[in-house]
Amino acid sequence: MANVILADDHPLFLAALKEAVERAGINVVGAVTRGDELVELADRTEQLDAVLLDLSMPGYDGFKCLELLRASKPKASLIVVSGSDDEADIQRALDLGAVCFVG
């Protein structure tokens, strides 16, 4: 079973995403609303397969999280889930190691 962390600053969206991911049979290791919490949790998670994260979060923004997670968890799939449709944001996220960008 895959181990995933979810990160988004909107609690209702985060709860809905968590429910959908768990229904798909994926183990949600944690769901956080701040980028700094995401990085801390990822560092404590031994087997991390994927991270679904937003770009706009307090603490560390999604770009900083991508940079830090790519360095500390190189095998984890980093997936950006964001309402942004800005081409520069999409390209930057991909350049920082996101495997895909879901807008």
Image (tube, rainbow, N blue to C red):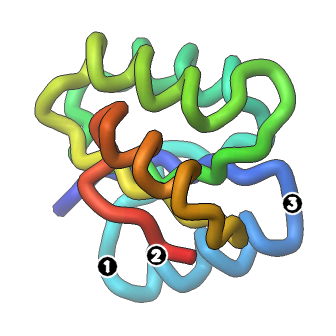
Which disc number belongs to residue 92? none
- First reached walking from the N terminus: tag 1 or tag 3: 3
Q: Disc 3 or disc 2, which is closer to the eye?
A: 3
Name which residue type carries label 2.
Glu
Identify the amino acid type marked 1.
Gly
Mark 3 lies on a secondary structure that is loop
Residue 22 is labelled as 2
* In this view, 41 is above or below 96: above
| Image marks 2 and 1: residues in contact by CB distance under 8 Å | yes
**Structural distance between the alpha carbons of marks 1 and 3:** 23 Å
Image quadrant of residue 64? Answer: top right
Where residue 13 sits in the image (x, y, percent)?
A: 78, 73
The residue depicted at 72 percent of the width and 52 percent of the height is 8
Q: Name the spot of residue 56 as percent of width and height, x first.
A: 77, 45
Residue labelled with disc 1:
25
Residue 103 as seen in the image, left or right of residue 34: left
Taking the spot 80% from the left edge, 20% from the top edge, the residue there is 59
The residue wearing badge 3 is 10
Q: Position of residue 96 (x, y in %)?
A: 35, 32
Categorize mark 2 by other alpha carbons within 10 Å: few (<14), some (14-19), many (20+): few
Residue type indicated by callout 3: His
The residue carrying pointer 3 sits among few (fewer than 14), some (14 to 19) or many (20 or more) residues within 10 Å by Cα, namely: some
Percent coordinates x, y for residue 73 in the rendering: 25, 23
